[in-house]
Image: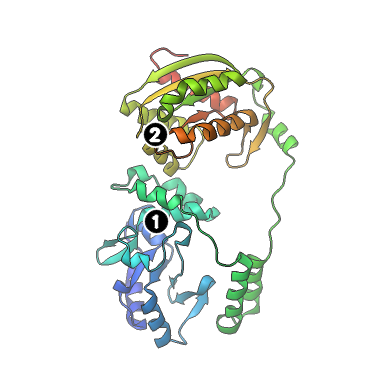
Amino acid sequence: MKIKDIDKLESIAEEFGFSLCDICLVGGAVFADYDVRENGDLDFVMMSGKKAEVISNNPDKFTYGPNMALNFPEKVQCVNGKYHRVGVADDALFSDEYSYINRDGLRLARIEVNLANIIKRGWSKDKTDLKEIDPGAIPDFDWKLFLSLLEHKYTKSASKQEKAKLTLRHYAKVAIKDPRKIMAFIKRHLTKKPKASYNSASKTEVLWQNEKSDSETRYCAILWGAAVHCHEDISADIAAKYEILHSQDIALSDEQYHGFIRAIYQIDDIDPWKVSLKIKLLTEHESKIRFLQFRIPSPSFRPAQRTGSYLCDNSAALKRELRKKYRDSITNYYKDIIIHIGDNERHNQAILNIVNAYSPSPA
């Protein structure tokens, strides 16, 4: 898939006095380059010195978007601070070789940077992209870089409302003449949206209407190979709280382990990038798992807003407790590589089916 409207970008560069060497394409253009989807517009970052020169030489040719973005014709925009959430400054896209790639005379942000950014910002419009991108299928995907970007902690120099007010003043003075657009901007940036609420008891009751009673469900736990040296201690901790009904150690080949991990996490219908990340992290350790079945008497449940299903509070609390206790015992620990437990009756049955498919002696 080719990046759409590159010819428009070339004519705009010529008109406004910059070259393609002065910019780095970001956002949708990066995904288009990797055949994820077609870009709807063209966003780029420009070297700071060059940007000041372009603005100075073309004082009356721009309108300005949020965060002082420069709006060029033909849905072409020079954005600012595109990747601040992951710690990549605009100028780093021209000086840090880990932040960009060169493709046929164009500079593009690396897909690791682009993907980490949309994950961190959590916008609803990005959900489709996250469903389409599987880093495991991208040649030379830099997992170390990707994880470092995801773990970056950033702070805002001003509150969201303070920044919005500053931008609004600029809109009122320079760019926006239409009062309706100003009001739309105020609503978008300065109006607090009420938090969604629901009656958890009634919602849980609806979720349960056509479900098998969980009072006798066997909860399934998988102790991953990353924690193989802690399997005995983790098993003992679970046994101290709940009755263990079955315990089984299973050694898998590397190929089997890949397939097993993918099958387990597909139960949750999580994004492909998360499944690939699990496979990457877990396969750096032994491929020996421990499978446990245990009973939780009188479990309590709550709706799972992400999936629209429901999950057991008791099993969720158990996972949190064990991860916190053993995380420092795991080499190169990253969240969720110690234990996996099914959320509800359907999840546990699916886990049991997968384990039986891979085990020489089914449970």
- Write down the quadrant of residue 294 in the picture: top right
Sequence order check, earlier mark of 2 and 1: 1
Q: Residue furthest left?
A: 104
Which amino acid lies under the numbered mark 1 shown in the image of this protein? Val
Q: Position of residue 40 (x, y in %)?
A: 43, 63
Q: Secondary structure at mark 2?
A: helix
Read off the residue under disc 1: 113
Q: Residue visible at 24% across and 64% down?
A: 104
Looking at the picture, how far across and down is residue 134, in whole percent?
Answer: 39, 44
The residue type indicated by label 2 comes to Leu
User: Residues under labels 2 and 1: Cα distance?
Assistant: 22 Å
Q: Is residue 83 left or right of residue 305?
A: left
Q: Position of residue 329 (x, y in %)?
A: 45, 32
Q: Which residue is mark 2?
A: 282
Report the front residue among 202 and 54: 54
**Residue beneath the point at 41% across and 20% down:** 357
| Res. 215 in view | yes
115 or 267, nearer to the observer: 115
**Is 138 above or below relative to 345?**
below
| In this picture, residue 261 sits left or right of residue 125 | left
The spot of residue 11 in percent (x, y) is 33, 77
